[in-house]
Amino acid sequence: MKPLMIEKFYAYLDTPIRMQVRFALAALIVPLLLSFITPMWRISMYAPQYPKGLYLDIYSYKLEAGNEGQHLQEINTLNHYIGMKHLDRAEMSDLDWLPFGFGILALLAMRAAAIGTTRSLIDLTVINLYVCSFAFARFIYKLYLYGHELAPDAPVKVEPFTPAIFGTKQIANFTTHSYPASGGFFILAYAAGVTLLTVWYLYSGRVRALRQTRPA
C-alpha cells in the first residue's frame, strides 16, 4: 500500500500545474520586478539638531540618502564620532548578490508559469523562502557588526549596540526608525503570494484526490 501511495505522490509532483495557477504566478512576478526600482528599506534618524530627520533608502543595488545625498554625509559624520565604520556602497557589498538573486527568482517564476509542474512550484516556494530569509539575516548581521565593531579611539565612547532592525530605537539623543519601504513590501507580496498559492494548490489537489478515491 505504501509503495503505491509513494508512486502516486511522485506522479502528482510531475503533473502540470493548472492554468489559473500559471496566470497567478505570472501576476506575482510584477511586484518582484518592481522591487528592482524601489527602495527595500528605509532607515531614518531624528534628533533635536535634526528636527526634519535624516534618512537612508536601501535599494537592491544602491544606497540613496535624502537631500540629494547630503544626509549620508551627515550620517557618516555622526557615526565617526562614535567610531562606526563609514557607510557607503562599498561597505554594503552584501547588496551585490541581491539583483542576481531576485533575477533568478523571476526567471524561475516565469519558467513555472510557462511550463511548470507541481514539483517546480514547490521548488520555487522553497527557494523563495531561503533567499528572502538569507537576505534578511545578512541585513541583521551587517547592522550588528556596524554597532559592535566600534573604533576604540572614537571621540565619543558608547557601549556596543545593535542599530534598529525593525521598529524604533533610542540611541543617545537620536531616535532611529527602521522599516520596510515599498520595495520590501513588493518582495513580501511576491514571496507570500507564491507560498499561499502553493499551499492552496497542494491542499486543493489533495481534496480532489480524496474525492476521486471515495467510493460511489
Image (cartoon, rainbow, N blue to C red):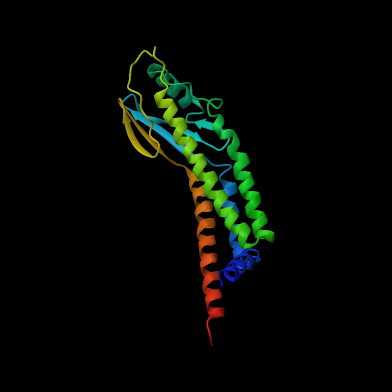
Depicted 94 relative to depicted 5: above or below = above
**Does residue 40 appear in the picture of this structure?**
no
Residue at position x 59%, y 54% in the image = 123
Depth check: give the residue in front, 216 or 174: 216
Question: Looking at the figure, which quarter contains the N terminus?
Answer: bottom right
Left or right side of 36 for 167: left
x and y percentages locating residue 177 in the rendered image: 37, 36
Residue at position x 52%, y 81% in the image = 214
Which residue ends up furthest to the bottom in the rendered image? 216
**Does residue 200 appear in the picture of this structure?**
yes
x and y percentages locating residue 208 in the rendered image: 55, 75
Left or right side of 159 for 195: right
Depth check: give the residue in front, 119 or 43: 119
Depth check: give the residue in front, 89 or 147: 147
Question: Looking at the figure, which quarter contains the C terminus?
Answer: bottom right
Residue at position x 63%, y 57% in the image = 120
Depicted 111 relative to depicted 5: above or below = above
x and y percentages locating residue 45 in the rendered image: 38, 30
Depth check: give the residue in front, 97 or 119: 119
Residue at position x 65%, y 64% in the image = 14
Q: How many marks?
A: 0
Depicted 21 relative to depicted 70: above or below = below
x and y percentages locating residue 164 in the rendered image: 38, 34
